[in-house]
Amino acid sequence: MSDKLNINQWAEEDRPREKMASLGAEALSSAELLAILIGSGSTKESAVDLMKRILNDCNNSLNTLGKKSIHDLSQYNGVGPAKAITILAACELGKRRQMESPEERPDLGTATRVYNHMHPIMQDLGVEEFWVLLLNQHHRLIKKVRIAHGGITATTVDIRVIMREAVLCNATQLVACHNHPSGNITPSKQDNELTISLMQACKLMDIHFADHVIVTDGHYYSYHENKKC
C-alpha cells in the first residue's frame, strides 16, 4: 500500500485549503493553489509535488501551463482528463480576469448619491426595509446589506449584526438607509433612537457614521445634511 497521502490526510498546518483559509491565497505557491483544484496526486507523489513537477516542465510559467492541451496534461501520472480540464479552466479564468477592468465601486459620499443608489431598490416597497452601506475611506461602496424587513425600530435592527458586517468588510464608514412607504420623510422617534444607537456603536468601533438617509419615492431626508449626526 502506498504511503502517499491525499490532501485531506495531510497534517492540518500543511493542507493548502487550511493554509489559504488562515493565511490567505497570497501565502500559497502556484503549485499549492493548483493542488487544491486537483485534490490528489498519484500513488507516487502528492498533489503539490505533482503540480510542482508539471510547473517545472512549464518553466514555472502559468502562461505556458495555460497553453497545454488536455492531452498534454493527461500524460502525467495522476492527471486524468477531468483534472486536466480543471487546470485549464482555472488558467482560462485567470486570463479572463486579467482582461477585465476592475469593478467600479460607486461613490456614496453624499446623501444625494445614497438616495440615487438606493431609490431604485426601495421605490416600490410596500413595507419598510433597513439597509446599511459599508464604505471605504474614499466613500466607495464595499457592500450593502439589508438588515431588516418590515417595521423598523431599534429592537428589530440588530446593531451587533451591523457592526459585525462592518468589521468583516474592513469598512471605515457606514451609512444607514431605510424607506418610508407613506411618503413622509420626517424621521420618527424610533428613527431617531436607532440613529443614536448606531452612532454610539460606530464610535465604539472607531467607524465613521456618515449618515442616515430616509428614502421616499421622489424625496429623501438626511441626518447629516440636517446636522443631526
Image: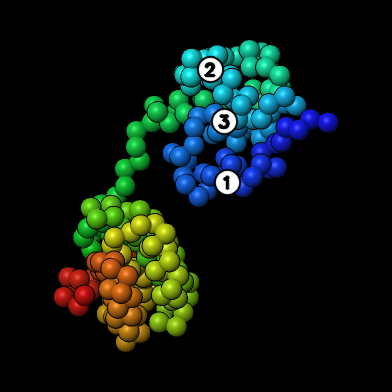
Q: Give residue 48's quadrant in the image.
A: top right
C-beta proximity under 8 Å, tags 3 and 1? no
Q: Earlier in the sequence, mark 3 or mark 2?
A: 3
Q: Earlier in the sequence, mark 1 or mark 2?
A: 1
Q: Split into 4 quadrants, where in the image is the N terminus?
A: top right
Q: Give x and y (percent) for residue 137.
A: 24, 55
Distance in Å between CA atoms under marks 1 and 2: 25 Å
Q: For the residues carrying marks 3 and 1, which lies nearer the camera in this image? A: 1
Q: Amino acid at mark 1?
A: Glu
Q: Amino acid at mark 3?
A: Leu
| Residue drawn at x 45%, y 39% as measured from the top left | 27
| Residue drawn at x 60%, y 42% as measured from the top left | 15
Q: Which residue is mark 3?
A: 34
| Residue drawn at x 41%, y 75% as measured from the top left | 159
Distance in Å between CA atoms under marks 3 and 1: 18 Å
Q: For the residues carrying marks 3 and 2, which lies nearer the camera in this image? A: 2
Comparing 155 with 125, the one in front is 155
Q: Which residue is mark 2?
A: 56
Q: Which residue is mark 1?
A: 13
Q: Give x and y (percent) for residue 31.
A: 54, 29
* Residue 184 makes an appearance in the image: no
The colour scheme is: rainbow
Disc 2 is placed on an element classified as: helix
Residue positioned most to the right = 1
* Residue 130 makes an appearance in the image: yes
Residue positioned most to the bottom = 189
